[in-house]
Amino acid sequence: MPEPSPPSGGTCAAALREALAKPLAGDDLTRAEAIDLLETPAIAAELIGAAGALRDRAWGRTVTFSPKVFLPVTNLCRDRCTYCTFRKDPEDPDAWTMTPEELRTWSARGRRLGCKEALLCLGDKPEVAFASYRATLATLGHRTTAEYVERASRIALDAGLLPHANAGLLTFAEMARLKEVNVSLGLMLENVSPRLRGRGEVHQWAPDKEPARRLRMLREAGELRIPFTTGLLLGIGETLAERVDTLFAIRDLHRAYGHVQEVIVQPFRAKPTIGRSDAAEPTATDLACTVAVARLVLDPEVSVQAPPNLSPADVALLLAAGLNDWGGISPLTPDYVNPEAPWPHVAALGAACRAAGHRLRERLAIYPAYIDRPGFLAPALRGGVAALAAEAAAGDGAAEVHAP
Ligand code: SF4
């Protein structure tokens, strides 16, 4: 915990303690209260306690993860976010567009290792920027990356996996097609501040990070009734108020359409090869307090997640702060977005959760509440979801059984 300091946002500590009781009583925090809670280190312990209590009420002491295989369909990208090491140009020796055969092989290996989710994660619209990639797509029989992702999703389905594509900005029509072969889709909102698109900011060279365009995709996913994953990226030059505004935007979209199944709170991690190599990373307390405010701002049924490989020493702290999910963990493939951060062994994570008073169990890439909610799961995917849900239930507790 940081050194106590007086509230900086204008609200006294006593008033903030009163505000902390509101979500537990079913009332909303105001924007000003949420900002003051984040800006007031003196209240951090109470903030974390309130968020943990709300999580206990909504989700209990079961914390989940999704066993996944990460399929980086292509690491070419037309954007240039200054914190990114994933994207490559076509002439880069590490540039890679997976072939259908590679997708098949990796999916089958993942399935054999117990994976149930295929995370298709890739750069944004490289066909707009690179003629050589357009030629690659044409060789594969496709015009757009979204078309190829649809094919990759079918390959993963054929291997017995449930696809979840995070393919950058998609149109309404593209999402409608992908819904037929994906149990859920994802797009990190990251932050709603247009300021971060300005000169010298992280998204200056990333037209697909225009917040209005990402908000439109989130809204259209809601109109299409697609179970959706989104989230915040912390430490990219945003203010604490802009984090809160991002949470409120997600909350409002979920209240309008009921489709946001989970929100990832992801810290920026510095890497030697990026433009922001010397930028400060969010501290553990900063991350935990943001998880807590997310828990208190978002409706209780929305899952709050943080990637365990980016905060391996902070499992207990994040659980205390109201987290209820660790996201996808792969026994096969690295985190291609943060390759320096290995996934935890499920057994070790299970032991850490148990030591903190929680029980780790598997979930699918579609949360249970969305499986039977009318219109959210394509009928053709129902059989696969039922089969893997049964398999997950049969293996329930394995993480605890095998924990050291
Ligand atoms: S973060 Fe995503 S959109 Fe930005 S450069 Fe990397 S791959 Fe492209």
Image: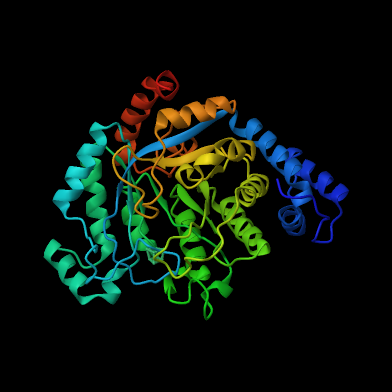
Question: Foreground residue, 9 or 59?
Answer: 9
Q: Is residue 188 left or right of residue 121?
A: right
Q: What percent of the width, then of the height, locates residue 330?
A: 34, 40
Image quarter where ligand 1 lies:
bottom left
Would residue 159 be visible to someone looking at this image?
Answer: no
Question: Foreground residue, 146 or 222?
Answer: 146
Q: Is residue 323 left or right of residue 26?
A: left
Q: What percent of the width, then of the height, locates residue 310?
A: 48, 47
Question: Foreground residue, 39 or 55?
Answer: 39
**Residue located 72% across and 39% down the image:** 50
Would residue 239 be visible to someone looking at this image?
Answer: yes
Q: Quadrant of the C terminus?
A: top left
Determine the residue located farthest toward the left in the rendered image: 139
Please, is residue 387 above or below residue 266 in the view?
A: above
Determine the residue located farthest toward the bottom in the rendered image: 199
**Residue located 25% across and 35% down the image:** 111
Determine the image quadrant of residue 345. Answer: top left
